[in-house]
Image (tube, helix red, strand yellow):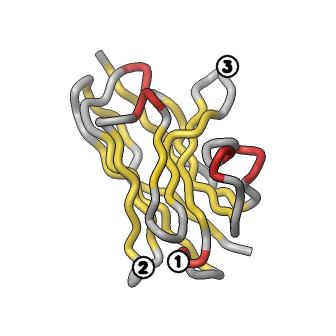
Amino acid sequence: QMRLVESGGGSVQSGGSLKLSCAASGASISTYEMAWFRQAPGKEREGVAFMDTKGTTRYADFGKGRFAISRDHSKNVVYLEMTTLKPDDTATYYCAARSWGATTFALSQHTYYDWGQGTQVTVSS
C-alpha cells in the first residue's frame, strides 16, 4: 500500500499560481498510475489530472492549458502545477494512486484505492 502526503496548498488571488506536491512512500510512483482530484464543499469529488506509468497524461476540461501534472522519480513525488487560478478552483486537492486501470476511467475516483489526506486551495477574487 502506498502512503501519500500532499502539500503546497494555500490562499492565492485570482490569476495566481500554486504548485502542489504529493510525496509517496511504501512503493515507487514509477510503477503506479497517479492522479489528482479535488472536492469543493457540497460537491462531488472530481478528477483533475492523471499520469500513467509511461508519462501519458489526461486532464479534466477545466484544467486543460492551466494545470500540469508531473513527477520526479528520484524523489518519489508527484506535482500539480496550477496557473491562472480562478475562484471556482477553490477546493481540497487530493493525490491518489492505483496500480493499473482502464484509461477511460483515469479521472474516476472509484478506480483509486490509495489516497492522501488532501491540501486546501483557496482562490479569492
Could you tell me which secondary element the residue under label 2 belongs to?
Answer: loop
8 relative to 37, above or below? below
| Residue linked to disc 2 | 73
- Answer few, some or many: residues within 10 Å of disc 3's Cα (few below 14, many 20 plus, some between 14 and 19): few
Q: Position of residue 65 (x, y in %)?
A: 30, 36
Q: Which image quarter: residue 107?
A: top right
Looking at the image, is mark 3 or mark 2 nearer the viewer?
2
Q: CA distance from mark 3 to mark 2?
A: 35 Å
Q: Amino acid at mark 1?
A: Ser
Q: Which image quarter: residue 124?
A: top left
Labels 3 and 2: the sequence-earlier one: 3
- Answer few, some or many: residues within 10 Å of disc 2's Cα (few below 14, many 20 plus, some between 14 and 19): few
Q: Position of residue 99 (x, y in %)?
A: 69, 69
Q: Amino acid at mark 2?
A: His
Q: Quadrant of the C terminus?
A: top left
| Residue linked to disc 1 | 30
Could you tell me which secondary element the residue under label 1 belongs to?
Answer: helix
CB under 8 Å between callouts 2 and 1?
yes
Q: Amino acid at mark 3?
A: Gly
Labels 3 and 1: the sequence-earlier one: 1
Seen from this angle, which residue lies furthest top?
125
For the point 55% across and 72% down, the residue is 24
Could you tell me which secondary element the residue under label 3 belongs to?
Answer: loop
- Give the label on residue 42, or none: 3
